[in-house]
Image (cartoon, rainbow, N blue to C red):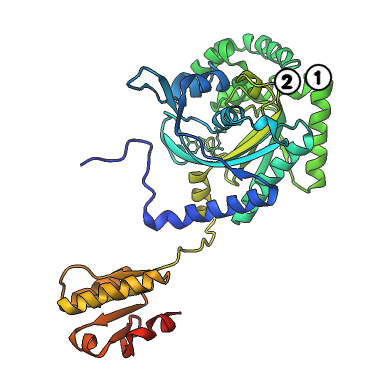
Amino acid sequence: MYKSPRGTADILPGEQHYWRYIESKASEVCRLYGYQRVDTPVFEEAGLFTRSIGEGTDIVTKEMYTFQDQSGNDLALRPEGTAPVCRAYLEHGMDNVPQPVKLFYFAAIFRYERPQAGRYRQHYQFGCEAIGEASPTLDAEVIDMAWRFFSLLGLREFSLQLNSIGCRICRPKHLEALRQYYAGQAGGLCQDCTTRLEKNTLRLLDCKKPFCQAAADRAPKSSDYLCQECSEHFEHVKTYLKTAAIPFRVNHRLVRGLDYYTRTVFEIHPPEEAAQSALGGGGRYDNLIEQLGGKPTPAIGFATGMERIVLNLKKQQIAVPELPRLKLFIACLGEEAKLEAIRLASQLRQQGIPVLLSAGDRSLKAQLRQANGYGVDYTAIIGEDEVKSHTLTLRTMATSEQQSIAASKLVELLE
Ligand code: AMP
């Protein structure tokens, strides 16, 4: 028997209401903040990601699903949503329409990671990107939108962590200070951090290993190395968040896993904080569009993992509306009744009323059992007598009560 590949999951009908709920709240929040939906392909040229996410990042070095197609093109399954949206922004000349361009997406994301609770090799993200505006007001608005989204979902006690990792001008000074600091710790770092020291210094700060965490706590803080513009930007973001009454904690170890971030970075965490628990995160990426061949264009975005939201909705026992159930099953006995049942089902569907039509030639008892199994409220029974008299027998499943009605009255009754 085949199984779904390790780290992937089927979303079965019984779970779908969580997903539709998240999508509807996400779409609602996007409407409130003026974001429009965009869908990009599941795979892209691999270079798009290596260029933007960064050659030294875990995603690029260890986690990308890359492959060559029959023509020898190097492609990759999308390991994140921002670079494809920026590629689309440039490809379709969205730099020529009023800025910022605000886009959102639901996308399957692929990363070859070690599967565990809340961490999969295929997961889904809801993300949004606001491209073409440098003001800290937009940073605060994106964070405000993320905050409102989790509130609208009904989640409780989530918290916001904030940091600024500076820009091209000030970050090198911070990185140099980090290298000097970590050079003195080299013997005691984990294998990954020893590599990071060379290739991805900033990521030393968010290593999850306890010893490395202690070293990271004492490490030079990016906020102490910000240039004046970055420092002012960060102060504005904090002031705007306070004005919007959004509580936050500055976490100087928050750096995020992708190289393209500049200035503001943030994450939203659920109450019980585990190493891999972030509900969502984002930040500014003021150099990315330029890196992808566009003119310098500031931008900021946010993404959240939908599986983690489902986990937290369940953990917090939030009542999520069920999807509408089918109300009516049509049972029939005999060949003529079957034709009548087909006609009736077609008529009802024509009028927008969903029905389940019995197929096969089961006994009435078996058909009623089937109807019960589907959980419908009513079963319309059509037999020889009903065909002759243009009626049907309507059975209320909960009480087993039956009444004979004119077939033409069914719609009225159901409504
Ligand atoms: P990132 O693109 O790494 O910033 O991730 C954004 C959000 O997606 C995270 O905060 C998580 O909620 C979710 N996420 C990231 N990686 C995974 C994964 N492997 N499995 C499930 N959710 C994930």
Q: Are marks 2 and 1 in contact (CB under 8 Å)?
A: yes
Picture quadrant of residue 362: bottom left
Q: Which residue is mark 1?
A: 227
> Would residue 165 be found to the left or right of residue 28 on screen?
right
Say which element carries label 2.
loop
Name which residue lies at 45% across and 63% down.
323
Residue 310: percent from left, percent from top: 49, 50
Ligand 1 within 8 Å, label 1 CB: no
Name which residue lies at 35% across and 22% down.
69
Name which residue lies at 43% across and 83% down.
412
Q: What is the spatial separation of the Cα atoms under label 2 and label 1, in whole angstroms? A: 8 Å
Label 1 Cα crowd, 10 Å radius (few <14 / some 14-19 / many 20+): some
Q: Is residue 155 visible?
A: no
Q: Is residue 381 visible?
A: yes
Picture quadrant of residue 353: bottom left
For marks 2 and 1, the one nearer the N-term is 2
> Would residue 21 be found to the left or right of residue 327 on screen?
right
Q: Which residue is mark 2?
A: 167
Residue 261: percent from left, percent from top: 65, 25
Residue 405: percent from left, percent from top: 33, 89
Q: Is the residue 299 above or below the residue 170 in the image? A: below
> Would residue 333 be found to the left or right of residue 291 on screen?
left
Q: Amino acid at mark 2?
A: Cys
Q: Amino acid at mark 1?
A: Cys
Number of numbered callouts drawn: 2
